[in-house]
Amino acid sequence: MGVTALAKPAGKWCTHFSRSRGCGIYAARPDDCRVFNCLWLLTEALDAAWKPSVAGFVLHSEDQGRRLIVECDAARPHDWRRAPYEASLRRWAEAGTEVLVFAGLRGLRLDPSGDRPVRRA
């Protein structure tokens, strides 16, 4: 995701992030980061398989939960297609949730009548 306060564009790793230690400015992180809610942390129904470091993507919602955003790790852009992820994401799309899968600026809207490409604004 993009972080305006850090001039971090969407689809790029944050310069303060390290795979070995996580966020290097966590205690002093900007409000953009503080208000972000990873659904894996918030949703008991998502088990350990959905942990971002395991799944290869981060889930968050927009529009009061009506839109689900899948932010893929650029090094693992197709991991969302593995079981159990793709089947669950498609089930949620069929139930009426808008599901958008992004790898950088390019994405896909999962739609029961046919997936459609999307671009991040």
Image (cartoon, helix red, strand yellow):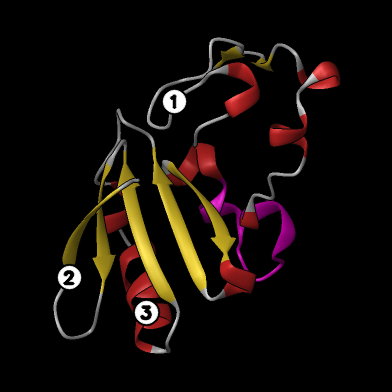
Task: Please state if 17 lies on the left or on the right of 90 as rendered.
Answer: right
In the rendered structure, are the residues bearing label 2 and label 3 in contact, judged by CB atoms less than 8 Å apart? no
Residue 71 vertical placement versus 4 (above, below): below
Quarter holding residue 11: top left
Quarter holding residue 45: bottom right
Residue 84 visible in the shown view: no
**Residue at point 42% right, 32% down?**
10
Q: Nearer the viewer, residue 37 or 18?
A: 37
The numbered disc on residue 104 is: none
Q: Which residues are magenta?
A: 40-51
The amino acid beneath tag 1 is: Pro
Residue 27 vertical placement versus 90 (above, below): above
Name the residue beneath numbered marker 3.
93
Mark 3: secondary structure: helix
**Residue at point 49% right, 69% down?**
67
Name the residue beneath numbered marker 1.
9
